[in-house]
C-alpha cells in the first residue's frame, strides 16, 4: 500500500459514525498490523496517528463508562430515567425538558453534557439516542407560563410532563440538580448531573436539539431577532433587535422589561 492509499484508508476509518466505534477500533488495529513493517516516513507517521487515535478512543470509552456510576449504583431498578432541561435563561422561547431511559450498559462515545458537544455531534448523538433508547419523553412550557407562574414552576412542570410522556414507566429518576415535586417515583438530584450520568447527558442532548430546532422554526417566522443563531438568548444583536423592533409573541415579558423599558 502506498502512502496516498494508506492515508485514504485511515481517513475512511475516521469517517465512521459514532456507534461504529468497535469497527473503527478493529480496522485501526488491522491497518497498523498490516503496515507496521513498512519503515517509510510517511507510512510511519500515519500509523502513529492511528495509534494515537486508538488511545483517544480507549480514553473516550473509559470516560463514558465513568459516567455510568449512578446507573450502576441503582442497577437493581428496571428503568432508570435521566431528566434534564434547556431554556431557563433565554429571553424568548419555551423551557423544554427531556426524560430518557437508556438500555442498561449502553456505551455511546462522545455522550456528554450538551454544552460540551459540538452542534454536529449533538445532532448525531440525538439520532443515536432516539433510535436506541428504551423510551424518550419531552415536556415544554411556553413563555406565557414562564411569565405567569415563573421559571421554577414552568421548568418542574415541564419535567413532570416529560415523565408522563414516556412510553415506559420509570422506577428511578436521575435529575440534573433539582428535585421534582409531586412525583411518586424515587429520584436522585445530581449536581452537574449532565456530566456525571449517561442518562442525564442523553436527556440533555435530546432537550437541546429539540429546542434548537424549534427556535430555527421561530427564526423563519420572526427573522429580525436572529433566533437561528442565538436560540433566544440575549446576544448583543438580539438585544439590539428588541430595542429596534420591540418584542415578538414568543418573548418572555418578565425577562425583557429592563431592555424595552416596560
Image: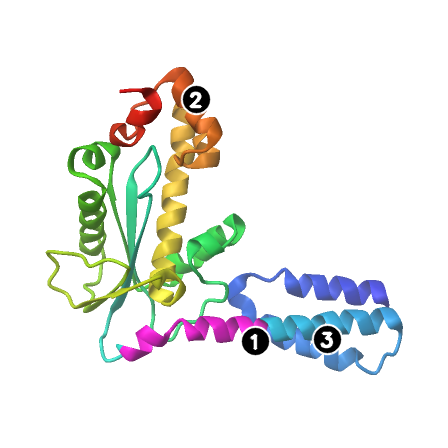
Report the coloring of the rendering.
rainbow
Disc 1: CA contacts within 10 A as few (<14), some (14-19) or many (>=20): some
Q: Which residue is drawn at the image coordinates 22% and 76% (left, top)?
A: 77
Quarter of the image for the N terminus: give it.
Answer: bottom right
- Looking at the image, is 243 positioned above or below residue 155? above
Magenta-drawn segment? 57-73
Determine the image quadrant of residue 143: top left
Drawn side of residue 215 relative to residue 48, left or right: left
User: In the rendered view of the protein, which quadrant contains the C terminus?
Assistant: top left
Element type where label 2 sits in the image: helix
Between residues 8 and 190, which one lies in front from this camera angle? 190
Badge 1 or badge 3: first in the primary sequence:
3
Q: Residue at x 20, y 56 (%)?
A: 163
Task: Say few, some or many: other residues with alpha carbon within 10 Å of mark 3 (under 14 / 14 to 19 / 20 or more).
Answer: some
At which x and y percent is residue 34? 76, 80
Task: Identify the residue under disc 3.
Answer: 31
Provide the residue designation for mark 2: 241
Residue named by callout 1: 58
What mark, if any, has residue 216 been given in the picture? Answer: none
Mark 1 element type: helix
Observer-nearest of 183 and 90: 90
Q: Is residue 204 magenta?
A: no
Q: Secondary structure at mark 3?
A: helix
Query: Where on the picture, by quarter, is residue 111?
Result: bottom left
Quick check: can you spot residue 22?
no
Amino acid at each position: 500500500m502506498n502512502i496516498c492509499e494508506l492515508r485514504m484508508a485511515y481517513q475512511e476509518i475516521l469517517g465512521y459514525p459514532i456507534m461504529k466505534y468497535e469497527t473503527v477500533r478493529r480496522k485501526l488495529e488491522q491497518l497498523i498490523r498490516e503496515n507496521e513493517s513498512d519503515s517509510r516516513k510517511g507510512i510511519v507517521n500515519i500509523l502513529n496517528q492511528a495509534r494515537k487515535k486508538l488511545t483517544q478512543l480507549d480514553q473516550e470509552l473509559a470516560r463514558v463508562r465513568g459516567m455510568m456510576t449512578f446507573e450502576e449504583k441503582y442497577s437493581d431498578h428496571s428503568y432508570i430515567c435521566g431528566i434534564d432541561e434547556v431554556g431557563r435563561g433565554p429571553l424568548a422561547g419555551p423551557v423544554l425538558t427531556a426524560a430518557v431511559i437508556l438500555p442498561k450498559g449502553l456505551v455511546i462515545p462522545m455522550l456528554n453534557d450538551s454544552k460540551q458537544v459540538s452542534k454536529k455531534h449533538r445532532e448525531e448523538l440525538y439520532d443515536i439516542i432516539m433510535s436506541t433508547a428504551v423510551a424518550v419523553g419531552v415536556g415544554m412550557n411556553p413563555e406565557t407560563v414562564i411569565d405567569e407562574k415563573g421559571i421554577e414552576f414552568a421548568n418542574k412542570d415541564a419535567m413532570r410532563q416529560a415523565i408522563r410522556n414516556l412510553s415506559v414507566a420509570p422506577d428511578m429518576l436521575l435529575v440534573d440538580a433539582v428535585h421534582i415535586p409531586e412525583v411518586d417515583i424515587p429520584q436522585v438530584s445530581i449536581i452537574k448531573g449532565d456530566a456525571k450520568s449517561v442518562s442525564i447527558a442523553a436527556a440533555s442532548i435530546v432537550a437541546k436539539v429539540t429546542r434548537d430546532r424549534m427556535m430555527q422554526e421561530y427564526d423563519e417566522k420572526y427573522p429580525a431577532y436572529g433566533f437561528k443563531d442565538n436560540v433566544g438568548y440575549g446576544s448583543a444583536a438580539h438585544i439590539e433587535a428588541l430595542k429596534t423592533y420591540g418584542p415578538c409573541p414568543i418573548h418572555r415579558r418578565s425577562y425583557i422589561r429592563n431592555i424595552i423599558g416596560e
